[in-house]
């Protein structure tokens, strides 16, 4: 999956360092309220799927100095993901 | 906020001293009143005056918060080492496993991440300071530092070397950025040579940093 | 490229991780407790708080520490929600600093 850069202003929880990177879905965390809505007082709205996504470190950092196999996992809400 | 030199004595009352958990606390008698503390006291007074909160509510919450200590995490890990069925339950649903031991985890989700001979895990929150506080208490200063938040995702092996840990390339170093709703605790490997140890002895081997991924149980040198 | 939130620092260059154990001060523990009470009661939610911290001016954020961000973010959020007034908070803060009193048990 690609973690897209939605170029969205305001409160988001998708860090810049993973945007436009390719990863694989590791785990479906379940459905949670969208923090992008909650941050503006819009609570109790529909829950959205949240996934743990695994990205290889060598894909994240051009100068990554660790091992080829090293990876990073973080949680991404479904609207930030597109199939590759 | 670093404390300044003491300025003056003042009489004040404060809560009875309670047993300190592993997270160090100190009374602020010898610390000059800082801007941050003054702002907090002002805010608290205003909120109480407006009936938004009560002093009792704050005190009760403080006592609840004090229950979180690394010892609780260590108990879970030690039990997982001696009881493989518990370990399986902990890996499946760490929150439920904690509750089995009488540990009141209040985060929405808690996930235990197992270290293996081919994978070492390390936890960070790059965006703020997410940490399983109801299990482990307040995170250490290094965990919430900008240096750790910036570098743990980019150069985890260098950061681990600063903590005295080093792994061959055959062992994956896996970073978990807890940027959303899950909170994480590392389930470290049981050190070799501890087969005869009791569960209580095993608990003593497991420090706070082992549960975040910057230490290994029973030792603090290079692996 | 999107503007980076000030809190979004993953991957930025930084110095050695500071290893000093910094004991939590008495007021800091109580401040965290008060923060917990406020969100438990639905006065604000954690995401609103994080948004307020993200709105801190960059230079201020760089100099800030964890507890400073917590008390400042919480104050700004309560002001935004008109639960408290900026002037009354400033006045009370100044008064406490001026008198030098400290009362952990009101």
Image (cartoon, coloured by chain):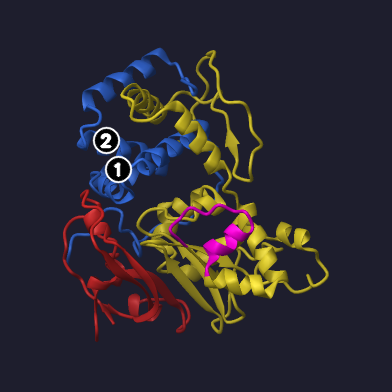
Chain colours: A red, B yellow, C blue
* Extreme residue toward the bottom, this view: A84
Which residue is nearer to you in this view: C7 or C73? C73
Q: Residues within 10 Å of mark 1 (few under 14, many from 20)?
A: some
In the rendering, which numbered label is found on residue C44?
1
Span colored in magenta:
B93-109
Is residue C18 visible in the rendered image? The answer is no
Report the side of B28 relative to B108 (left or right): right
Question: Which x, y percent locates residue A35?
Answer: 27, 58
Q: Residue at left 19%, top 55%? A: A10
Q: Secondary structure at mark 2?
A: helix
User: In which quadrant of the rendered view does residue B78 lie?
Assistant: bottom right
What residue did someone put label 2 on?
C78
Residue B54 in the image, given as x and y percentages of width and height: 41, 27
Q: Chain of mark 2?
A: C
Badge number at residue A45: none
Residue B88 visible in image: yes
Kindly identify the residue that appears in the image at 66 percent across and 36 percent down.
Answer: B19
Q: Residue at x 32, y 38 (%)?
A: C74
Tell me, yes or no, whether the highlighted magenta stretch contains residue C9.
no
Residue located at (16% from left, 66% from top): A7
Specify whether disc 1 shares its chain with disc 2.
yes
Pointers 1 and 2 in contact (CB under 8 A)?
A: yes
Between circles 1 and 2, the one closer to the viewer is 1
Q: Is residue C61 above or below residue A26?
A: above
Q: Looking at the rendering, which quadrant does residue A50 occupy?
A: bottom left
Q: Is residue B152 above or below residue C33?
A: below
Q: Secondary structure at mark 1?
A: loop
């Amino acid at each position: 999956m690609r973690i897209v850069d939605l170029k969205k202003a305001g409160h988001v929880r998708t860090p810049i360092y993973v945007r436009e990177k390719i990863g694989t879905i590791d785990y479906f965390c379940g459905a949670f309220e969208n923090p992008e809505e909650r941050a503006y007082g819009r609570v109790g709205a529909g829950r959205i799927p949240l996934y743990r996504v695994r990205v290889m470190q060598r894909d994240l950092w051009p100068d990554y100095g660790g091992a080829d196999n090293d990876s990073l996992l973080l949680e991404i809400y479904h609207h930030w993901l597109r199939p590759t | 906020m670093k404390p300044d030199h003491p300025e003056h004595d003042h009489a004040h009352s404060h809560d009875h001293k309670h047993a300190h958990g592993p997270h160090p606390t100190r009374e602020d008698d010898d610390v000059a009143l800082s801007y941050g503390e003054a702002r907090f006291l002002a805010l608290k007074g205003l909120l109480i005056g407006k009936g938004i909160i009560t002093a009792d509510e704050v005190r009760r919450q403080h006592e609840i918060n004090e229950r979180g200590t690394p010892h609780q995490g260590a108990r879970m890990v030690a039990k997982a080492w001696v009881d493989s069925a518990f370990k399986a339950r902990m890996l499946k649903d760490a929150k439920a496993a904690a509750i089995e031991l009488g540990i009141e985890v209040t985060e929405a989700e808690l996930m235990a991440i197992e270290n293996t001979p081919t994978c070492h895990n390390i936890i960070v929150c790059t965006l703020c300071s997410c940490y399983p506080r109801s299990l482990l208490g307040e995170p250490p200063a290094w965990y919430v530092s900008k240096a750790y938040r910036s570098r743990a995702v980019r150069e985890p092996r260098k950061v681990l070397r600063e903590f005295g840990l080093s792994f061959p390339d055959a062992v994956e170093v896996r970073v978990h950025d807890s940027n959303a709703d899950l909170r994480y605790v590392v389930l470290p490997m049981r050190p070799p040579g501890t087969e005869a140890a009791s569960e209580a002895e095993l608990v003593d081997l497991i420090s706070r940093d082992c549960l975040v991924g910057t230490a290994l149980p029973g030792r603090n040198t290079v692996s | 490229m999107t503007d980076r939130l000030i809190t979004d620092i993953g991957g930025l260059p930084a110095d050695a991780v500071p290893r000093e154990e910094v004991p939590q001060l008495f007021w800091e523990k109580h401040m965290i407790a008060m923060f917990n009470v406020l969100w438990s009661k639905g006065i604000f939610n954690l995401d609103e708080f994080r948004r307020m911290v993200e709105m801190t001016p960059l230079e201020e954020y760089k100099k800030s520490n964890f507890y400073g961000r917590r008390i400042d973010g919480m104050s700004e959020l309560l002001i935004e929600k008109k639960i408290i007034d900026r002037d009354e908070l400033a006045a009370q803060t100044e008064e406490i600093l001026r008198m030098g009193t400290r009362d952990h048990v009101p």
